Image: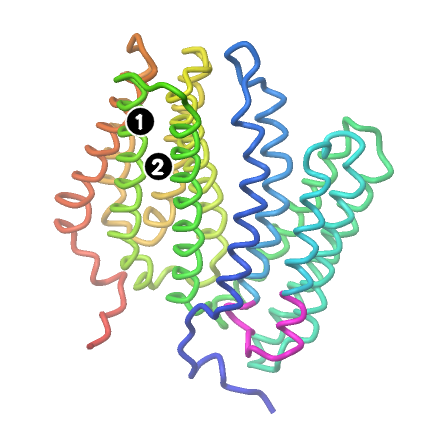
Amino acid sequence: MHSTFHALSIRHATWLELFFDLVFVAVVGVMAHGLAHTDHGEIHSEQLLSFFLVVVPAWWVWAGHTLFANRYDIDSIWQRLCAIAVMALVLVMSLFLKNAQGSGYPGFVLTYLAMQAVLAVAYLTAPRTTLAGDALARGTAIAILVGITISATSLLMAWQWKFALLYTGIIVQLLLMVRLNDKARAFPIHRKHLIERVGLFAIIVLGETVIRIVGSFTARDQYDIFDVIAAAAGFLLIVQIWWIYFGALHLLERAKRIQSGLLVMVSHLLLYVGIIFIANLTGHAINGDLNHETFSLLGVTGTVLFYLGKQIPYLAAYPPLRLAIIVNTLTCIGITVIATFLPRAEYSLLMMCFGMFVYVQINLWWVIPLHNVDAYSEAEEAT
């Protein structure tokens, strides 16, 4: 006999899930620490590559556990132990991050594989739900095991093939999960809980960016007007990101088209990385330790990743908004590109802040209120 707990329960993030998010954000902060260091005014391509190579596997584990908890969590002792085991392993992973491209690679991969194995066991022991829900749990566990097998072969390969095979395992697992979409639609996610989780992770990442700005500013023995401009512009950027991200999040909570959750998770990886880049951009503007070319590259990359990560779920969920979203996004990316031609990093950061202001205002006054999306939204619950 199948349980109906999924259909009847109202899900909210648990205290353990909040703790889980904090652990992962802390480790992502360690991964991003390499972006804070410059060499003769440059952030080398190896630093950027190293960040992306290690952050994606860690995020993929977080995303996998979040999707599992969303559908199958009953807060049992066994599930708590599985979550705690994953948290412990991600802390162990942090020991290998500094040399993940070299001698630390085996330790990094083995902890990643161990975390994925815990997730596979969690899916295989998930509580009974519906026929589609049970099939989805089994299929996801198989997808994880296939991904583990492929990624594990990277331990046997030469360096140039290691990360390629690691990422092949992740991509194959993702594709196998996409093939389960019919079962995912038949046993859909708790949409409000999923949006709550990605929103909570975003607010923690934003908090980390404020710490980065404060740390850069307080590390200076002397300040000038340009330091103040950079710190103020960086803070205003973060405030505006908070304002529009959470100001529009209720639309995703009501979006009927969001059923499997995979698109939301993948797009938010771009958003989180974009915010991290913007935080480091502000820190370097305050410290004055980054040449203008590298500063411009980091700024454009960070803002583009944020805009894409923010907009992709809305593009998929609300067809009437698509043209307005595209126009708004291209306009603000254009302002960011123009900002890179200004003579000082502080001026560029101010211009990027203005671009974010334009983005927020267009969303608040045109994109969101002037387009009827009722056909794609569930009615708001009465309070």
Expressed as whole percent of the image width and height from the top left, the position of residue 191 reads: 40, 65
Question: Which quarter of the figure has residue 296?
Answer: top left
* Label 1 – label 2 distance at C-alpha: 8 Å
Q: Residue at x 80, y 46 (%)?
A: 152
Say above or below: 254 vs 103.
Answer: below
- Spot the residue most to the front: 221
Q: Are marks 1 and 2 in contact (CB under 8 Å)?
A: yes
- Count of numbered tags: 2
Q: Is residue 80 left or right of residue 304?
A: right
Expressed as whole percent of the image width and height from the top left, the position of residue 305 reads: 42, 34
Mark 1, residues whose alpha carbon is within 10 Å: few (<14), some, or many (≥20)? many
Q: Is residue 340 left or right of residue 169?
A: left
Q: Which mark is residue 311?
A: none
Residue at mark 2 = 307
Mark 1, secondary structure of its residue: helix
Amino acid marked by disc 2: Tyr
Expressed as whole percent of the image width and height from the top left, the position of residue 223 reads: 33, 19
Say above or below: 85 vs 353.
Answer: below
Quadrant holding the N terminus: bottom right
Of residues 259 and 74, the one nearer the viewer is 74
Q: Is residue 147 left or right of residue 79?
A: right
- Spot the residue most to the bottom: 1
Magenta segment range? 69-83
Quadrant holding the C terminus: bottom left
Q: Is 73 part of what is drawn in magenta? A: yes
Of residues 65 and 367, the one nearer the viewer is 65
Residue at mark 1 = 333
Say above or below: 28 vs 68.
Answer: above
Q: Residue at x 70, y 55 (%)?
A: 89
Q: Is 276 part of what is drawn in magenta? A: no
Amino acid marked by disc 1: Ile
Question: Which quarter of the figure has residue 190?
Answer: bottom left
